[in-house]
């Protein structure tokens, strides 16, 4: 059974968020291709994870070193164990909501999601073959998609093979036909899901 990790940073919640709508559609398409898939949703909308401090980071790394069972290691363990990572995040202030950055810091854990060889080369440990980044923006996104650029580099560090992005842009521009923009983005989802499943 394949495990999808759905990192939900759609801060306005499933009803209001247009990004969440794209995520639902993607997960449904993917499930149709692979009905055995299990989805683990990491809900970031309550911003419950604390900002990583030096003390917390040392504590977490020590727990990872000893192989302990701790909620502090859950973000890293879920990234390490996912076959596919789906990140849903609106375009906020040129990138994505801070709650997602906090999560990514928790998930970047020595000995769980990355390690170093004897020669000092950093190697990612996630078994995920793809990370899919779904986003929507009030204005243009793709011209300066800094959130995705960061996620792509982060995924490479974690050992994720390939990163894919779908963005619905210009949703808040006066007179925008929001439904048409979202529908056009949704039309691309079946192909995206096939690629992510491949
Ligand atoms: C805090 C905040 C910051 C935002 N920053 C940007 C921005 O930098 N550029 C932009 O084009 N839109 C920006 N927007 C608009 C959102 O990208 C847009 O409304 C998006 O579709 C929201 O996604 P959602 O419907 O999933 O919540 C921002 C919205 C909020 C609430």
Image (cartoon, rainbow, N blue to C red):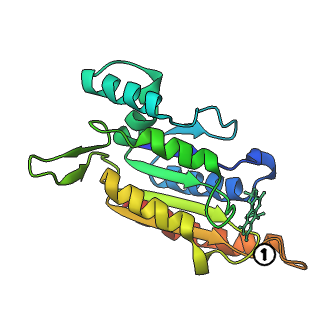
| Side of 50 relative to 10 (left or right) | left
Above or below, comparing residue 150 to residue 75 in the picture: below
Residue 1 seen anywhere in this rendered image of the structure: no
- Quadrant of the rendered image containing residue 140: bottom right
- Image quadrant of ligand 1 equals bottom right
Q: Residue at x 70, y 35 (%)?
A: 46
Classed neighbour count for the residue bearing mark 1: other residues with Cα under 10 Å, few (<14), some (14–19), many (≥20):
few
- Quadrant of the rendered image containing residue 137: bottom right
Above or below, comparing residue 177 to residue 30 in the picture: below
Above or below, comparing residue 190 to residue 67 in the picture: below
Q: Nearer the viewer, residue 117 or 13?
A: 117
Q: Residue at x 49, y 59 (%)?
A: 132
Tag 1 secondary structure: helix
Above or below, comparing residue 171 to residue 58 in the picture: below
Percent coordinates x, y for residue 175 in the rendering: 90, 79
Residue 9 seen anywhere in this rendered image of the structure: yes
**Residue farthest to the top, as pictured:** 69
Query: Which residue is label 1 attached to?
Result: 180
Percent coordinates x, y for residue 172 in the rendering: 82, 71
| Side of 150 relative to 26 (left or right) | left
| Side of 157 relative to 11 (left or right) | left
Tell me the quadrant of the picture where the N terminus can be found.
Answer: top left
């Amino acid at each position: 059974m394949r495990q999808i990790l759905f990192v939900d940073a759609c801060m306005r919640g499933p009803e209001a968020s247009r990004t969440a709508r794209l995520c639902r559609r993607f997960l449904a398409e993917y499930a149709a291709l692979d009905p055995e898939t299990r989805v683990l949703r990491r809900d970031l909308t309550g911003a419950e994870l604390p900002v990583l401090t030096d003390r917390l980071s040392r504590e977490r790394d020590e727990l990872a070193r000893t192989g302990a069972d701790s909620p502090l290691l859950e973000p890293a363990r879920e990234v390490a164990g996912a076959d596919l990572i789906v990140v849903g995040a609106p375009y906020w202030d040129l990138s994505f909501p801070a709650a997602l950055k906090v999560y990514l810091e928790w998930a970047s854990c020595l000995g769980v999601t990355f390690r170093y060889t004897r020669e000092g080369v950093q190697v990612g440990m996630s078994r995920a073959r793809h990370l899919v980044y779904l986003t929507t923006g009030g204005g243009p996104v793709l011209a300066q998609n800094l959130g995705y650029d960061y996620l792509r580099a982060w995924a490479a560090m974690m050992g994720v093979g390939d990163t894919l992005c779908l963005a619905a842009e210009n949703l808040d521009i006066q007179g925008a036909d929001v439904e048409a923009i979202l529908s056009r983005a949704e039309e691309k989802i079946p192909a995206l899901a096939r690629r992510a499943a491949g």
